[in-house]
Image (cartoon, grey):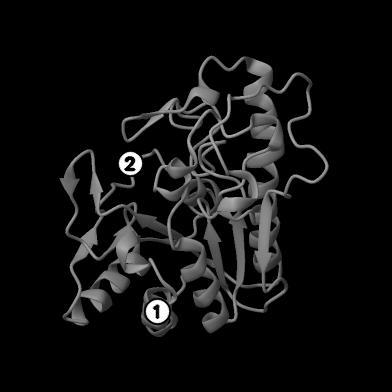
Amino acid sequence: MAELGDKIEKPSSPARSTGAQLLRPGDPYPVIVRRFGEDSSFLIVCDHAGLAIPSRLGNLGLAAAAFETHIAWDIGALGFAERLAARLSATLVAQAYSRLVIDCNRAPGHPQSIVTTSDGVAIPGNAGLNDQEIASRVREVHAPYHAFITAEMETRLTGGRRPLMVCAHSFTPAMLGVSRPWHVGVLHGEPSPASDALLEGLRAEGDLVVGDNEPYVMDGTDYTAPHHCWSRGLDVIELEIRQDLLADAAGQERFADLFARLLPRLTIG
């Protein structure tokens, strides 16, 4: 995965892809995989892990500082997900590219798939895209990521295991000027026995402000959980952890320890 300084050093004018191909040689592959081949029913996914931008797109017309904020990625989510995967001996699949290129937790064509503004910030490189430019982002960034997740799910099902996907996200402590008090949230559709049991376990910790479908509601905007799990009749866990609590390795370790303790108690049905 590209680090901040690899591709985002100063503002630049947004570039356009002039041909059918978006990614150039040297651009990162969109799928980050950790602990491939683990024999675990858990599969950890991280849709908003990365900060990479295809070199053809410059910096999407943004200043470097924008890529230090939540509009570009889920801060701390990848570090947390890597640590959780290690503790659960589970495979992790994560997206290398910034959510500003295309949001992999939105269906292609969804109004929030390729945003032109985020939390009040204009994204010049996403304005006025034509069908070919949109299709290249879907084909080269979104599709390979979800194809890899599909393959991992099918491997588990073919092997006689009912996988429990854990979607790792983080959320900003304030959005559009409104503070968010929750430390952690569990997003779910109904029914979700695994989510209900996890919420009970989190509340029993006694020192956490726990959100039930907070700070977001699983209302049809999400793509990853419905596409890979609900369509197969599988339960799923979607976690949201406040970003200030994942800002350093110590915080990521703390929450990895917490969920590595609670998740194995869930019944995968």
Mark sitting on residue 250: 1
Q: Residue furthest front?
A: 10
Is 3 positioned to the left or the right of 236 in the image?
right
Of the two numbered discs 2 and 1 in the rendering, the one whose residue sits closer to the viewer: 1
Camera-side residue of 117 and 33: 117
* Residue 242 at least partly seen: no
* Marks 2/1: CA–CA distance: 32 Å
For residue 242, side relative to residue 55 (left or right): left
Categorize mark 1 by other alpha carbons within 10 Å: few (<14), some (14-19), many (20+). few
Q: Picture quarter containing residue 32?
A: bottom right
Quarter of the image where the N terminus is located: bottom right
Residue on which the image places disc 2: 219
Quick one: 234 or 205, which is closer to the camera?
205
Lower position in the chain sequence, tag 2 or tag 1 = 2
Residue drawn where x is 43% and y is 31% of the image: 112
Q: Is residue 266 left or right of residue 163?
A: left
Q: Nearer the viewer, residue 38 or 180?
A: 180
Q: Residue at x 55, y 75 (%)?
A: 85
Residue 23 - label: none
Visible residue check, residue 158: yes
Label 1's element?
Answer: helix
Please report the residue visible at 39 percent of the width from the left and 79 percent of the height from the top: 250
- Locate residue 33, reporting x and y percent: 67, 63
SS class, disc 2? loop
